[in-house]
Amino acid sequence: MNTPAPGTDTVYIDPLRRERVRKKARSDALIGVASLVGFVAVVVLLVGRSSGWETVQKTFFNGDQFAESFPGLLEAFWLNVRIFLIAEPLILIIGLLVALARTVKSPIFLPIRVLATMYVDIFRGVPTILIIFLLGFGMPALQLTGVPSDAIFWGTAALVLSYGAYVAEVFRAGIGSVHPSQTMAARSLGLSSFQTNRFVVLPQAVRNVTPPLLNDFISLQKDTALVAVLGPIEVLRRAQIDTSANFNYTPYVGAALIFIALTIPMTRFADWIQVRSARKKRAGGVA
Amino acid sequence: MSLSAFIEIDSVWKSFDNHPVLRGLSLTVPAHSATVLIGASGSGKSTLLRCINALETVDAGSIVIDQELDVTAFKTDLDAVRRRIGIVFQSYNLFPHMKVLENITLGPTRVLHKSKKESEAAAMELLTRFGLQAKALDYPDRLSGGQAQRVAIVRALAMEPEIMLFDEITSALDPMLVGEVLDSVRELREGGLTMVMATHEMSFAKEIADQVCFLNEGIVWEAGSATEVFDSPARPETQEFLQRVN
């Protein structure tokens, strides 16, 4: 191939250089695969030959136990899914309202601002499991008429309150991430402060915090298992019951697999959103 | 052309964190004229523009529009002021989450309460006038700097303002793109809109200005026609500034 004339509208890479790059890519791939295979082989050999492996396998990876408990685990997991599906929208609503309440400046709303700040300080400062204990055992103990005594209700409420505080902070950071010049541009068109928030600031804030919000969703999916401490038979409780019945820990592993099966797709989705928004930001420049 | 005072700026003071920027600045802007503000960075050009449409509140003094609307009075509805005055910023400030057309119709639909159909038709007409009709359904990140700035001009115009303020609108642009933006301003000038612009484009200022004001130490140091200020500046500070920028 001849060198094109200078100024020709074409991509030109020296053939020798191109060949070198291709060889390097091929050998990199080979080395990577070989190294991975070797590593797995060594781990399998070491673990399989170790004296305790058979006991570990029997206790944690018992096929019969797995087959026996798994359908029950899946059924119990449906409760985790329901808790998640009910809690998540409520968390988003509370988070957004609290974040907005913390940004209002009008002096008449000072009590609301103080309340919102206290809420975030308290519920972000207390361990989620402690809130679950407090509400789940405490509220029914009051024996008030009209107050539900259902463990699932209070467990979900505790998750909502705890995560609501976190999500409020995420939203608040999102509102802060929208450049003040956007507000200025909106106000210069005659939009009121409320309209500016509604049409210009909030849509951008929500977009900016989608990746961290998805991260909190993933965390919430796992934390639905905390409700187990109150007694409802969700997947962790089910696994615990099966485990103590047979003195075999395989059901725990089964429960873990179910969580992983749900969170891994969610994690990949969050990664994808993050990459996409980063790319968009780069392309956007000053807008 | 009527030369009645359209914007009457009287002894305006404005400071930021104890640092005085405007120090009793007075200026009269006649109707249907172009007033150009020149001066070093930090001389108060941007601050003055933002005070005119009440994006900043003044510390003292008054700014009266058309002899009846005092921008600086305590009881003035500032959203009403901003409806009558358009502003275009150095960094465009388009809304990145909205398409070009939505950027333009946001004000007319939400503030002037026009129908979506009516404001979209008006927006398309303006976009066509500025050669941007093909970009109507694009997001701002698909625009060049010059296109973005022209969309920002159209967005301000869609509110049918009586006054347009331009705050160094070509300063962030690639030199190749300055021309198309200035052409847009030229066209508005011919339409007879009252405009005040802060700029570093001296040759453009010379061409377009009915009145040139050199801002220095927070006041209008020297004002006059473009020929007067550019060709025979009276004060040494003006002469020195013009020498440095040319």
Image: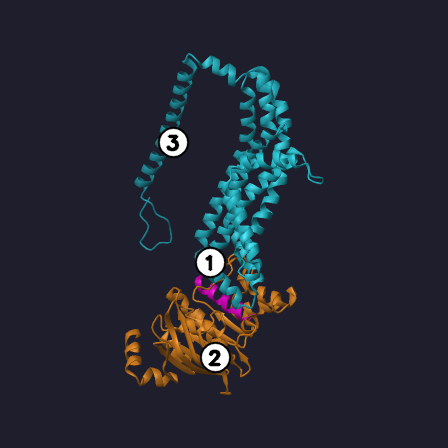
Chain colours: A cyan, B orange
Amino acid type, label 3: Ala
Q: Examine the structure image and report whether residue B154 is included in the region drawn in magenta.
A: yes
Reply above or below: B116 against B3: above
Would you identify the image quadrant in which residue A147 lies? top right
Query: What is the chain letter for disc 1?
Result: A
Per the picture, the main secondary structure of the magenta-coloured stretch is helix
- Range drawn in magenta: B143-158
Reply above or below: B37 against A209: below
Label 1 sits on residue? A179
Q: Secondary structure at mark 1?
A: loop
Q: Residues within 10 Å of mark 2 (few under 14, many from 20)?
A: many
Amino acid type, label 1: His
Q: Secondary structure at mark 2?
A: strand
- State the residue in front, B70 or A36: B70
Q: Examine the structure image and report whether residue A241 is included in the region drawn in magenta.
A: no
Would you identify the image quadrant in which residue A37 lies? top left
| Alpha carbons under labels 2 and 3: distance apart | 73 Å
Query: Could you tell me which residue is drawn at 38 percent across and 31 percent down?
Result: A29
Quadrant of the snapshot with the N terminus of chain A: top left
Task: Please state the horizontal and vertical placement of residue A239, each as a whole percent of the image.
Answer: 58, 23
Q: Nearer the viewer, mark 2 or mark 3?
A: 2
Question: Are dots 1 and 2 on a single chain?
Answer: no
Label 3 sits on residue? A29
Task: Please state the horizontal and vertical placement of residue A35, each as a whole percent of the image.
Answer: 37, 26
Q: Is residue A182 left or right of residue A239?
A: left
| Alpha carbons under labels 1 and 2: distance apart | 30 Å
